């Protein structure tokens, strides 16, 4: 593939988009007698999409919208979609279909669909043809020009579709409305170059492009100053950060720079691709006080033939070597991973290698998926003779093995005292708060709401497969 230089959207262009925000605010105010306009934004998919939604909300706020959690009340509905598995897409089609009735009661309501799923031409076409109540469709590449697209919809009453395929760009300075003041997402790069054979992401998110370190550091300095306590660096493969920049920088270097930013905050990052996770990065993780002792390192499969067909670029032995190297440096590191069951042609005997790898590593938690064919990816045209029933059985076995491990690992925490960040309110009135251990395990506790945003020592008093229970303890 030919190397393409990353397009950086100029400051003037971003300001031009802000100009559209002002025009939209005036138009809305004229047409609605100054009534407060409301937007409903919903996000499907990964943290990268959550971070994108914070930017979309930023644009909407600049246009004068406030936010509602009720579709019924909204003047504008924006669904930020995910294409990673069929199930994610089915949910979107179902919800968009149901919006016909909501819009019938609100004839002026504007419905917008964006995100990875929309970047696929066959999806955009289906929406255009069969979901006539949708006003605007755009993909991740067009996020920076959302104001201009919406202006065309509002002013000219046009249906607009913008899913132009491109390697992708970087736009700094888009406003953000963050979900939390305690924890923040910071995208350090966009896109993916890895083309794992099952995965749609490189097709819908374009090529890898890294933000300039000075832009990232400025954002993190501002967050630290505002009292943010946890920053998660985002990228499809953060380990390849900087490869596309003319500066001689890489991910471990960036971690060191961020670690040196003044303030009391924890650094997390995701996702790391095992093929690019180096011992040097593990050294830096161990040395940097602010970097959490945790890593999400997806292995996807335990069998080498399957890994090769997936185009992952490592063997199971190489993966295990990396885990060993990491644990030598950070013995109590929390390990999580993604795994796919039922990749085309994966036999049950090959799947046993996945179970074996799980037993050997003993992950703290796993995100488990049944393979879902994605149109246009190489795996979608591979022969897939294994019946779904067999895949589902294997999937259940995998859950059982992991659940036992998760429970055992969680029980090991009982009696220990850990510094945890209290990050929000829980559902259960008996345990009204939630917190996270340094390894990012969920802790339920009872306490004063003022504790939210504080790092406090918690004594772990109980555990289930899914979570820990704790109580405030004196500092050890
Ligand atoms: N960039 C990240 C993952 C992004 S997608 C990484 O490489 O680790 C998140 C997870 O979804 C993947 O790790 C994989 O386990 C799963 N996934 C991706 N495509 C899939 C597909 N077609 N079917 C099932 N699971 C899939
Ligand atoms: Fe998909 Fe692989 Fe890229 Fe992750 S690294 S986004 S799984 S292609
Ligand atoms: Fe989904 Fe796009 Fe993320 S496909 S998983 S929202 S990068």
Image (cartoon, helix red, strand yellow):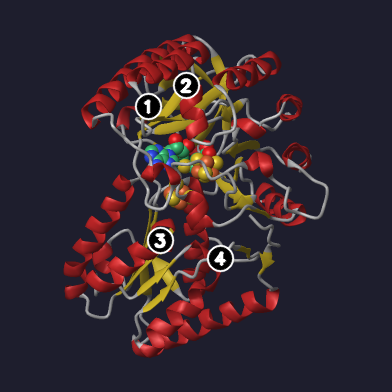
Of the pair 29 and 148, the residue shown nearer to us:
148
Residue 390 image-quadrant placement: top left
Residue 463 image-quadrant placement: top left
Q: Earlier in the sequence, mark 2 or mark 4?
A: 4
According to the picture, the residue beneath numbered tag 2 turns out to be 303
Q: Is residue 40 visible?
A: no
According to the picture, the residue beneath numbered tag 1 turns out to be 346
Q: In this rendering, which labeled residue sits more in front, label 3 or label 1?
A: 1
Q: In this rendering, which labeled residue sits more in front, label 2 or label 4?
A: 2
Q: Which mark is residue 93?
A: none
Q: Are marks 2 and 1 in contact (CB under 8 Å)?
A: yes
According to the picture, the residue beneath numbered tag 4 turns out to be 166
Of the pair 360 and 197, the residue shown nearer to us:
197
Graded by Cα atoms within 10 Å as few (under 14), some (14 to 19) or many (20 or more), the crowding at tag 1 reads some
Q: Secondary structure at mark 1?
A: loop
Q: Earlier in the sequence, mark 2 or mark 3?
A: 3
Graded by Cα atoms within 10 Å as few (under 14), some (14 to 19) or many (20 or more), the crowding at tag 4 reads few
In what quadrant of the picture does the N terminus appear? Answer: bottom right
294 versus 21 height, above or below: above
How far separated are the C-alphas under marks 4 and 3? 12 Å
Q: Which mark is residue 120?
A: 3
Q: Are marks 4 and 3 in contact (CB under 8 Å)?
A: no
Residue 372 image-quadrant placement: top left
Of the pair 92 and 309, the residue shown nearer to us:
309
Q: Quadrant of ligand 1?
A: top left
Residue 246 image point, x, y percent: 80, 55
Q: Earlier in the sequence, mark 2 or mark 1?
A: 2
């Amino acid at each position: 593939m030919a190397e393409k230089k990353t397009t950086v959207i100029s400051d003037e262009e971003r300001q031009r988009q802000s100009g559209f925000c002002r025009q939209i605010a005036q138009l809305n105010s004229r047409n609605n007698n100054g009534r407060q306009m409301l937007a409903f934004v919903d996000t499907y998919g990964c943290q990268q999409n959550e971070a994108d939604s914070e930017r979309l909300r930023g644009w909407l706020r600049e246009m004068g919208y406030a936010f509602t959690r009720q579709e019924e009340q909204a003047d504008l509905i924006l669904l930020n979609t995910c294409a990673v598995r069929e199930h994610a897409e089915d949910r979107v089609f179902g919800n968009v279909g149901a919006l016909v009735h909501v819009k019938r009661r609100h004839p002026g309501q504007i419905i917008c669909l964006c995100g990875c799923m929309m970047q696929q031409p066959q999806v955009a076409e289906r929406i255009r043809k069969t979901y006539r109540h949708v006003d605007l469709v755009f993909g991740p590449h067009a996020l920076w020009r959302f104001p201009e697209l919406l202006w065309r919809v509002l002013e000219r009453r046009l249906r607009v579709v913008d899913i132009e395929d491109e390697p992708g760009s970087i736009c700094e300075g888009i406003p953000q409305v963050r979900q939390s003041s305690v924890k923040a997402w910071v995208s350090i790069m966009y896109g993916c170059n890895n083309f794992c054979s099952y995965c749609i992401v490189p097709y819908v998110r374009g090529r890898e492009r890294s933000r300039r370190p000075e832009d990232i550091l400025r954002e993190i300095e501002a967050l630290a100053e505002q009292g943010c306590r946890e920053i998660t660096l985002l990228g499809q493969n953060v380990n390849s950060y900087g490869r596309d920049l003319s500066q001689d920088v890489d991910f471990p270097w960036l971690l060191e720079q961020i670690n040196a930013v003044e303030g009391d905050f924890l650094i997390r990052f995701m996702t790391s691709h095992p093929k690019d996770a180096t011992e040097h990065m593990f050294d830096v993780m161990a040395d940097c006080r602010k970097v959490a002792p945790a890593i999400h390192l997806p292995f996807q499969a335990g069998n080498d033939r399957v890994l090769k067909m997936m185009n992952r670029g490592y063997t199971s032995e190489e993966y295990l070597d990396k885990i060993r190297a990491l644990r030598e440096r950070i013995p109590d590191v929390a390990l999580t991973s993604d795994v796919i069951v039922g990749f085309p042609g994966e036999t049950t005997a090959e799947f046993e290698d996945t179970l074996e790898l799980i037993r050997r590593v003993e992950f703290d938690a796993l995100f488990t998926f049944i393979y879902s064919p994605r149109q246009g990816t190489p795996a979608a045209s591979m022969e897939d003779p294994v019946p779904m029933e067999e895949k589902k059985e294997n999937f259940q076995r995998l859950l059982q093995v992991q659940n036992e491990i998760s429970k055992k690992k969680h029980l090991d925490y009982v009696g220990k005292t850990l510094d945890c960040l209290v990050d929000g309110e829980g559902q259960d009135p008996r345990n009204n708060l939630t917190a996270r251990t340094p390894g990012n395990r969920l802790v339920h506790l009872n306490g004063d709401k003022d504790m939210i945003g504080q790092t406090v020592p918690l004594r772990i008093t109980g555990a289930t497969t899914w979570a820990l229970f704790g109580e405030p303890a004196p500092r050890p």
